[in-house]
Image (cartoon, rainbow, N blue to C red):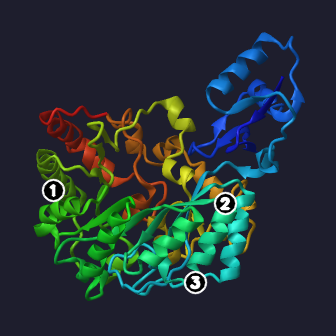
Amino acid sequence: MLYRLKQGCSLRGWLFNPYSLVRDDWYMPTNLSVDEFNVLVRCDGETVFAEDESEEVRAILAHFLEEGVIEKRTEADPIDEVQAYKLYPCWRFNLINWAITGRCNYNCRHCFAAADLNPMAAHPTTEQCLEFVEQLASCGIRHVWITGGEPLLRSDFLQIAQALADAGISIDDIGTNGSRITSELLDELEAMGHKPQFNISFDGLGHHDWLRGVSGAEKRTLEAIQLLKRRDYRVKVQYCLWDGNLDTLRETTRHLADLGVDHLRPIRIVEAPRWKAAEYGHTLDFRAYCDLMLDYLDWYLGESLPMELEVWSLLDYMPESGQCRLTPVKRCSVERDRLQPVCGDARNMPFVASNGSLTLCNQISGWEAAHGVEHGNVYQTPLAQLLSDSPFTQQLLITRAQVREHNPQCQTCEFAGVCSCGCRAVALAATDDLLAADPTQCVFFKGGYRERFAQVLADHGIESW
């Protein structure tokens, strides 16, 4: 009997994950045991399985037949070359967040990517971008989020998108201000096979223009959301909060729900270099942010709004399942802390800034630029090298245990069993120390907000976890 991998299934390996199954219909690669790999590598459409194969081999074949990974063949039918095993010379990453430009047609007062009062307007060449696409493919990366600056300002944006499609890399998310979204752009993306979520910033009816620094931004953003929903695109709105736009928070939320927005992410403006340098004096301290979101959550649940609600650094609520996760709460232990990266998000999705700097996240990029910090540049050093043993990957290996050792108060804290030490971007913004305790975590747990949010959820019949 012959077996072959089904179309859309391939065998891959990375450093520390040498045996993996990749499926086009599954987002993440699946680790394989040595025995499973040894069976699947024989499912090449040419290798004959004997009738007296061991019970273990027969069980593995039955499992992957049921999972839709392999199929039987009575005649030789070789797998495609792309399905054959390939070993990549780096750590396994599935997703990269890539700022393809620092240029923007807006002048946002709180820009994460700005090193100071001026934008970080780095703009890699077309050749650099296309070469980077090849490097992404050579590292086995299958998904990207595209951001900027304003990524749609690039005249070669569609050329980059086509290169990604040709390399088998999907654009899952485009972070944009919405001003350059057109039906023609969507037609082109769909023809390439891309159907990304659009992650659009909108900061309140009557307030959006001020924060974005451009007259007419509000009108253009709302028109873009309407166009995307008419074309059946998933839309996520990031809603930046400061003490100047709270008066229309609920009205804006209703309006976004009426437009069909799928996912709403209110986020407290953090003390990014540009925001602090301008001394606007509008930053919400974390306690005020928590109090605001307690009332807002109670109202939101009472309105039965259909949007997914992700309150930055506090909670994720999924209305379809009726479940809610309090994001600061993690399962922590001495053993787990020694192994768990303190920044799990960065381990899942590193960020490439517009100047090519490889860093933990977008929120940190402006701080690093302002302080002259860099842990590797993708336009100067091969990506495979940066994603194996490099100053960048050493950052990724920083564990919760190291942060606790750096902060003696964390070692004896009564909440050490549930507090994961928080966000590194917030720690940097507040203290200029990557290993510092995230002060917002202290407010959340010591201020009783864990219990207070859980009570609001319970009042609406929702169990938190």
Residue 312 position, x and y percent, is 32, 55
- Residue 357 placement, left or right of 431: right
Q: Are marks 3 and 1 in contact (CB under 8 Å)?
A: no
Q: Label 2, on which residue?
A: 391
List x then y, in percent, for residue 52.
86, 11
Q: What secondary structure is found at the residue carrying circle 3?
A: loop
Front position among marks 2 and 3: 3
> Disc count in the image?
3
Foreground residue, 369 or 196?
A: 196
Up-down relation of residue 255 to residue 439 (above or below): below
Q: Position of residue 197 (x, y in %)?
A: 43, 60
Mark number, residue 158: none
Callout 2 amino acid? Pro
Vertical side of 380 occupied by 259: above or below: above
Residue 123 is labelled as 3
Residue denoted by label 1: 292
Give residue 374's quadrant in the image: bottom right
Query: Observer-nearest residue: 141 or 425?
Result: 141
Which badge, 3 or 1, comes first in the chain's sequence? 3
Sooner in the amino-acid sequence: mark 1 or mark 2 = 1
Q: Residue furthest front?
A: 75
Residue 391: x and y, percent?
66, 60
What is the C-alpha distance between the residues marked 1 and 2?
Answer: 39 Å
**Res. 395 visible in picture:** yes
Give the number of the mark in front: 1 or 2: 1
Question: Residue at coordinates 82% horizontally, 49% vertically from top-left?
Answer: 81
Residue type beneath disc 1: Leu
Give the alpha-carbon distance from disc 2 to disc 3, as whole Å.
Answer: 24 Å
Q: Amino acid at mark 3?
A: His
Of the two numbered discs 3 and 1 in the rendering, the one whose residue sits closer to the viewer = 3
